[in-house]
Image: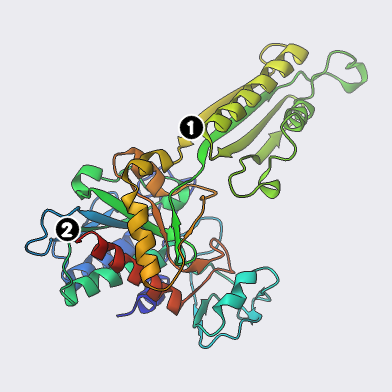
Amino acid sequence: MKAYERLLQYVRIHTKSDDDSTTVPSTARQFDLANALVEEMKSIGITDAHVDDKCYVYGSIPATVGYEDKPAIGFIAHMDTAPDFNGEGVNPRLIENYDGGEVALGESGRSLRPAEFPHLKQLKGRTLIVTDGTTLLGADDKAGVAEIMTAAERIIDEKKPHGRILVAFTPDEEVGRGADCFDVKGFGADFAYTVDGGQENIIEYENFNAASCHVEVNGFNVHPGSAKNTMVNALLVAMEFNSMLPSGQTPRDTEDYEGFFHLCDMSGNVEKATMDYIIRDHSLEMMESKKFTLSHIEKLLNEKYGSGTVTITVKDQYRNMVEMIKPCFHLIENAMAAVRDLGLEPITEPIRGGTDGARLSFMGLPCPNLGTGGYAYHGPYEHITVEGMELATEIIIGIIGKYVK
């Protein structure tokens, strides 16, 4: 079976995760795909395939006789889809020999246009897979699941020599919990790759350092007619807090290695207000500087309005995996070589976000990220190509081959 054929099956299984849930997995429906994958893995020859009680799917392919001393390489993808858009009732459409132009997405009134997505012109002549405009597609990351599964099937069927290969499919990546219950020791890989990126020739091994900041503002509410030098309007103080942040360091104004402060939520009244930020930077030093800026603003406002007016709580979320990848840079060199073997030029660029691989790298499993061939994730404009998925599958197989030499 080809990777895209698997994708068309997987996307019809509803697996959206839930930010607000406290269960593991965050939605029980993720077991629907997990159980189906276990049966499929067994059918292609991964005899030890199983799903645990936390909805993590694991399986392994024993090393070819004589190659037992080669590194054990893992490949990981996530089963859940993003909670910020409809993931139920996915109705994918294939467009053969795509002409590079505008594509109407069903009867939704939405269209996929080169004006918004300039890369579409480069996909001309391929078979494009799109949504009907009412759901996301789910290629993030069911394309990665399909490509790993297809690569595993080919390795087994074609009896290609290889070291031990490990496969894992995880829940809840989209809500930041995909690595929470991952059994690194039980998985048994020396190194691994997540297959969860964009364009098929992308290799990612740098990501943001990430933190959250919760701001609480305590105001003092009196009758506005007699409020002179007495009232402290929590909403206005909150606005003042935000105005003291660097105005050019927002997601809209930054790219590449530039970090940002992102105000995600603000609510309240005169007496009390809250704000929630995420803070991102590739540089650990710049990240610490951003944290200092937040605490300095807290100090200044408390000096101005009174102690306890503003309280911030900063929590680290994940770190830049590059420091864990550099000591085993063969992971990147072998991936780049596998991409070049297919006549493509590898693209290495920083991830303006995070991956399970970043957290796994700090859990003892160095784990850069590979492309799936997909674009415009997390919404109705999500799309991918049959050819891109085939190339992503070939890259996985090529990396496995590099580790037997």
What residue appears at the point 39 percent right and 77 percent down from the top-left corner? 4
Tag nearer the camera, 2 or 1: 2
In this view, 315 is above or below 299:
below
Outermost residue, bottom side: 97
**Mark identifier at residue 164:** 2
Which class describes the residues within 10 Å of circle 2: few (<14), some (14-19), or many (20+)?
many
Is residue 118 visible in this depiction of the protein?
Answer: yes
- Left or right, 172 with respect to 269, comes to left
Q: How is the image coloured?
A: rainbow
Q: Residues within 10 Å of mark 1 (few under 14, many from 20)?
A: few
Q: Secondary structure at mark 2?
A: loop
Residue 244 in the image: above or below residue 103: above
Q: Write down the quadrant of residue 334 in the picture.
A: bottom left
Q: Is residue 229 left or right of residue 380?
A: right
Image vertical order of residue 314 relative to residue 371, above or below: above
Which amino acid type is marked by label 1?
Answer: Asp
At a point 51% along the width and 53% down the height, the residue shown is 349
Is residue 80 visible from the viewing direction of this image? no
Residue, disc 1 = 316
| Residue in the image at 47% along x and 36% along y | 317
- Looking at marks 2 and 1 on the same chain, the residue that comes earlier in the sequence is marked by 2
Residue at 90% in and 15% down: 228
Q: Quadrant of the C terminus?
A: bottom left
- Point out residue 387 in the picture as x, y percentages from the top left corner: 44, 78
Q: Front-most of 221 and 106? A: 106
On screen, residue 54 versus residue 294, left or right, reads: left
Of the residues shown, which amino acid type is indicated by label 2?
A: Arg
Q: Quadrant of residue 291?
A: top right
- Compare residues 158 and 212 and report the one nearer the observer: 158
